Amino acid sequence: MSEDAFNMSIRKFLKEVGVTSQRKIEETVRKGQVGGNTLKVRMTLTAEGTGLNHVVDGEIELP
């Protein structure tokens, strides 16, 4: 696999993760399942058959 194809494959995956994650967060907030001014979030990335375990914690300010 070329570097360009590898890069595009990663970008496609990350775009899907970003778009679907945003939709799920918006649905959760709209349903009123969140209290307060911020939503604490965590994204965990793993890859089957590897030791990859990357965690990103953050906060999203709510309207």
Image: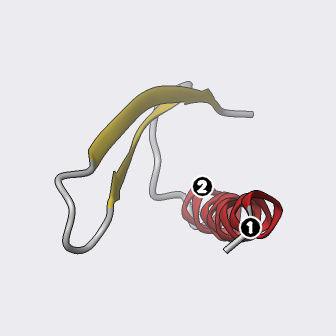
Along the line of sight, which residue is nearer the eye, 52 or 31?
A: 52
Q: What is the number of callouts on the image?
A: 2
Q: Circle 2 sits on which residue? A: 29
Q: Which mark is residue 2?
A: 1
Quarter of the C terminus within the rendering: top right
Label 1 environment density (alpha carbons within 10 Å; few <14, some 14–19, many ≥20): few
Instruction: Give the residue drawn at x 69%, y 65%.
Output: 6
Instruction: Give the residue drawn at x 58%, y 67%.
Output: 31
Q: Secondary structure at mark 1?
A: loop
Along the line of sight, which residue is nearer the eye, 10 or 62?
A: 10
Left or right position of 20 against 63 = left
Along the line of sight, which residue is nearer the eye, 48 or 20?
A: 48
Mark 1 and mark 2 lie on one chain; the one further toward the N terminus is: 1
| Image quadrant in which you'd find residue 21 | bottom right
| Image quadrant in which you'd find residue 45 | bottom left
Q: CA distance from mark 1 to mark 2?
A: 41 Å
User: Is 48 above or below relative to 52?
Assistant: below
Q: Secondary structure at mark 2?
A: helix
